[in-house]
Image (spheres, grey):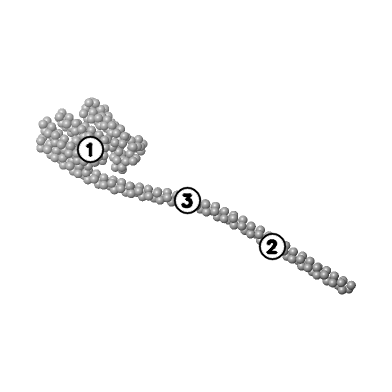
Amino acid sequence: MKTLFKYFLRNYSGKSLRQQQIAEVIVIVCSMLTVLLLGLAGIFLFKQGKPLIDSSVFGIFIVIGVMMVSLVVIRKGQTTIAAHVILVCMFFILWMILFISARDGMLVNLDTFIYTFALVVLAALITNRISIIIFSCANIVCAVVLANVIRNTHILPEKMLFEYLLDYAVVQVILAILCYVILKNSIRSYTSIETSLNESNRHRDSIKKILDQTNTTAIKLASSTEQMAGTTGFFSMNTQSQAASIEEITSTIEEVTASGEGVYDIAKNQTLLTEKVKENMDNLYNNA
């Protein structure tokens, strides 16, 4: 089933939830009806021995053709067209079978009118509330015309025919009202869900924007930190260089100081020697 949906619903990714579910229902209905109708046609042809031109068998193959056309339209993304193609074609086929059976006086095929109720339910699933009203009213009008045809053939007593018609009309109206209310509530739920999804998407976009801004800010901070680390390393290198220069200057000053003390000692010794020489000369002068 997933492969079937993937093949027919590839053009619905950007459409509303209601459109996606309508497309899924149409694909499921068309696929299942095609299989079931093929089996039913096989029973009519091979078990009951009905000819291919029999109204029931011929109608089945027409419905199968309509299902195929609807699937092609669904694959192109046109749910509204596909839904109305199915409903309108099935409506005409069902009532055509009923009118042909009534005209020929065959009551066996008159139970086909039961499928008209399923037609209204299908309209509620794949179309809108207006379609429910239109198909329900059309079914009642066709039932009145069919009853008039049956009355002219005198197949059923008029009183019994009137009771059948009244029961059919009442059930059709009740079914239409129920489908209308259910579809109304369903559409309201879809609207609420889509509103919530839109709000979630907006919040998601806001969060994504904030995360992008945070990421950008973090990148800028990392770059600034790297620059600060480089500047700090440069300052550290300068500080170390200045400290080394200060140590060299201090060592030079100490050397100069030591040299000054040496010069001072030498000068002091020279002074003492000079005084001693002077004293010796004075002694020599006095002795003479």
Q: Is residue 272 left or right of residue 182?
A: right
Quadrant in which residue 13 is drawn: top left
x, y (%) of residue 63? Answer: 25, 32
| Nearer-the-camera pick, 158 or 214 | 214
Q: Which residue is mark 3?
A: 220
Residue at the location (15% across, 36% down)?
141
Q: Amino acid at mark 2?
A: Glu
Q: Is residue 145 left or right of residue 241?
A: left
| Nearer-the-camera pick, 214 or 61 | 214
Q: Which residue is mark 1?
A: 119
Q: How many marks?
A: 3
Residue at the location (40% across, 51% down)?
210
Q: Earlier in the sequence, mark 2 or mark 1?
A: 1
x, y (%) of residue 284? Answer: 87, 71
Q: Earlier in the sequence, mark 3 or mark 2?
A: 3
- How far separated are the C-alphas under marks 2 and 1? 114 Å
Quadrant in which residue 274 is drawn: bottom right
Disc number lying in front (1 or 3): 3
- Whether residue 205 is visible: yes
x, y (%) of residue 98? Answer: 18, 32
Q: How many neighbours does mark 1 have within 10 angstroms: few (below 14), some (14-19), or many (20 or more)?
A: many
Q: Which residue is mark 2?
A: 254
User: Dot 3 lies on which element?
Assistant: helix
